[in-house]
Image (cartoon, rainbow, N blue to C red):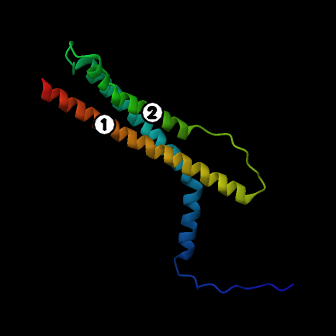
Amino acid sequence: MSDKIYASAPLEPDDLLWLEEGKRLVTESLAAVRNAANSLMASLGVLQSFYLGILSFGKPLPAHACFWEQALFSAPMVLWLVALYLCIAVVMTKKFPLLPNSPSDIRDKTMQLVLQKQTQLQWAVALLAGGLLAAFVLFYWRLQSS
């Protein structure tokens, strides 16, 4: 049995550095996504508290506003609660069957988990932004109608 040696391009001076950087990114990716979700949850908590304070003390709607007008002002809170749920889903650990002696199974399931959590985090950010936009539009509408 003979060993085959395959031809490859010569290494650039910084190739090893970038290979190490790639390994570090892979090993830290799940923790980074979870940390981002924790930060987003804190931001959502502050936004929700601020918004509820405005609704409670600022009287954005007159007392004679119909139900649908009042319900519209809950839209940002609903969006932010869904975003909070998604952040909690990112942070929560998930039980999944893993073959501990199979590098390809570990790689595939880890990448699948990271991509799923990254998608949930992106949706949470989009909902946070949508809630902010809805809040600004609602308050602008309220200012114009008064």
Measuring 22% from the left and 16% from the top, which residue is drawn there?
65
In the rendered image, residue 67, in percent from the top left (x then y), is placed at 29, 17
Measuring 21% from the left and 29% from the top, which residue is drawn there?
139
For the residues labelled 2 and 1, the Cα–Cα distance comes to 14 Å
Q: Where is residue 40, by image quadrant?
A: top left
In the rendered view, would you say 104 is above or below 1?
Answer: above
Judged left or right of residue 4, residue 38 is left
In the rendered view, would you say 112 is above or below 63?
Answer: below
- For the C terminus, the quadrant is top left
Measuring 52% from the left and 76% from the top, which residue is drawn there?
14
In the rendered image, residue 127, in percent from the top left (x then y), is placed at 39, 39
| Residue that protrudes farthest toward the top in the picture | 63
Report the residue marked by disc 2: 82
Mark 2 residue element? helix
For residue 14, the mark is none
In the rendered view, would you say 9 is above or below 106?
Answer: below
Tag 1: residue type? Leu
Report the residue marked by disc 1: 132
Tag 2: residue type? Val
Asked whether the beta carbons under mark 2 and mark 1 sit within 8 Å of each other, the answer is no
Q: Quick check: can you spot residue 30?
A: no
Judged left or right of residue 97, residue 45 is left
Mark 1 residue element? helix
Judged left or right of residue 52, residue 123 is right
Of residues 118 and 72, the one nearer the viewer is 72
In the rendered image, residue 115, in percent from the top left (x then y), is placed at 55, 51
Of residues 7 and 17, the one nearer the viewer is 7
- Local packing at callout 2 (Cα closer than 10 Å; few below 14, some 14-19, many 20+) is some
In the rendered image, residue 20, in percent from the top left (x then y), is placed at 57, 67
Q: Where is residue 1, by image quadrant?
A: bottom right
Of residues 30 and 21, the one nearer the viewer is 30
